[in-house]
Image (cartoon, rainbow, N blue to C red):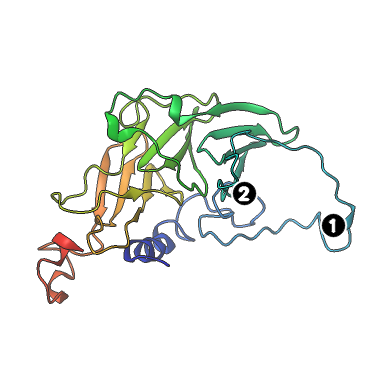
Amino acid sequence: MLGVAEVALLTFGLFACGPSGDNVDAHYSTWRNYGGTKEGNRYSSLDEINIKNVSELKQVWSFSSHDKDTSGRSQIQCNPIIINDVLYGVSPRSKLFALDAKSGKAKWIFDPFNQDTSSGKDAVPHYQITRGVAYWENGNDRRILYGVGPNIYAVNAENGKPVVQFGTNGVINLTEGLDREGGFNPFIVNTTPGCVYKDLFIVGTRVAETADAAPGDIRAYDIRTGKRKWTFHTIPHPGEYGYNTWPDKDAWKKL
């Protein structure tokens, strides 16, 4: 079930990251973005494999992160991306890995649980579903961004090290900067990768489905620094467009 914030993010994404956005693969022949393209259409125009030869496919390599839950409760929902013959994906226990797409050999593995971010106990990652990652580059600066529970990590795409210039030693905490005082359920996680638009990382969140849920706003962060650039309040605050259409003028404080 989609929440208000997720529907808003989906609608917003069609404009911010869709056909009018930058760096769109018009030929649908790569898989540089979660879901294939920034539109998320999950389509490829490649036709080397087709209904006539698909039965002839043979396994070339396999990879295991060796971190599935032994009781069978773990799952993986990640849709990997491929950049310059490197496959980037996320394991059941939130490890980010880079594989040589030709051989399947691991180039590096980033484990957020081994990171000392010095950003307080609230930055400790929690096992959550992570459906994919996002990629950004500018010259030799190449980054993978992905969510682990309430945290967004920026990782060097070449060596798997945290980009320390981003946020606090490579991580930002989505429970911060909510533009609202306490009194709400603190459950906030990022399960679906955000969208890269120029030098912005635009992200929505999954929040509780109870009446005391945290605000499910859409936020944009500077990809270089991790600083919040703007917030779209899914329930408008006083003075914002649409505020006067809400019968309850205090709805933004509690919904």
Q: Quadrant of residue 119?
A: top left
Residue bearing mark 2? 31
Task: Where is residue 21? Give x, y as percent.
Answer: 45, 55
Identify the amino acid type marked 2: Trp
Circle 1 SS class: helix
The answer to whether residue 225 of the structure is visible from this angle is: no
> Measured along the vertical axis of the image, is residue 100 above or below residue 245?
above
Q: Nearer the viewer, residue 139 or 155?
A: 155
The reply, left or right, for residue 53 in relation to residue 38 is right
Where, quadrant-wise, is the N terminus in this rendering?
Answer: bottom left
Q: Which residue is mark 1?
A: 54
Where does the image place residue 200, in percent across and percent down from the top left? 36, 44
Left or right: 194 in relation to 230:
right
Furthest-front residue in this view: 71
Q: CA distance from mark 1 to mark 2?
A: 20 Å
Residue at the spot x=32%, y=36% of the render?
172
Circle 1 or circle 2, nearest the eye: 1
The residue lying at 25 percent from left, 55 percent from top is 214
1 lies left or right of 107: left
Q: Is residue 106 visible?
A: yes
Expressed as whole percent of the image width and height from the top left, the position of residue 34 reads: 54, 51
| Picture quadrant where residue 103 is located | top right
